[in-house]
Image (cartoon, grey):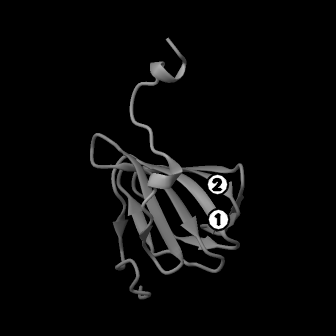
């Protein structure tokens, strides 16, 4: 039995990624679903993008794969990780183009409509 035939679960190839536009300058692709309606995503930001304020009822984990973002006045660069506990609230500012892996046990609740540009 080859190593490849022992893989269990779901595989997604880069060619299958379907990016969904979100706030101006950001997009995401869903990699997998969680039991309570949450998701794992790749999320990308263009330099200067400012995300909408949102809360995380189930918490959030992200890992910066590329680039530089700011959350709550704190800088995160490639290799940095952030855990936001349930109920945490923030918005993301992209200092440079950035790519993140994001794990959301439950979907976030937005205080503004994504793509609206309003608060």
Left or right, residue 14 beside residue 30? right
- Quickly name the residue at label 2: 64
Residue 20 at x, y percent in the picture:
41, 68
What residue is shown at x 28% (from left), y 40% (from top)?
35
**Residue closer to the observer: 75 or 24:** 24
- The answer to whether residue 114 shows anywhere in this view is yes
Q: Mark 1 and 2 residues: CB-CB less than 8 Å, in contact?
A: yes
Kindly identify which numbered label has been placed on residue 44: none
Quadrant assignment, res 110: bottom left
Q: How many marks?
A: 2
Instruction: State whether residue 8 is above or below residue 107.
Output: above
Residue lying at 50% horizontally and 54% vertically, measured from the top left:
15
Name which residue lies at 46% across and 56% down: 17
Furthest-front residue in this view: 1
- Residue at mark 1 to residue at mark 2: CA–CA distance: 7 Å
Q: Is mark 2 on a helix, strand or loop?
A: strand
């Amino acid at each position: 039995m080859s190593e490849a035939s022992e893989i269990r679960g779901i595989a997604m190839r880069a060619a299958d990624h379907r990016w969904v536009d979100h706030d101006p300058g950001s997009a995401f692709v869903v990699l997998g679903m969680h039991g309570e309606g949450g998701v794992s995503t790749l999320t990308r930001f263009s330099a200067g993008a400012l995300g909408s304020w949102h809360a995380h009822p189930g918490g959030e984990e992200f890992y910066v794969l590329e680039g530089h973002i700011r959350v709550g006045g704190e800088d995160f660069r490639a290799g940095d990780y952030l855990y936001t506990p349930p109920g945490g609230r923030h918005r993301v500012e992209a200092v440079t183009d950035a790519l993140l892996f994001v794990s959301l046990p439950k979907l976030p609740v937005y205080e503004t409509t994504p793509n609206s540009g309003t608060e």
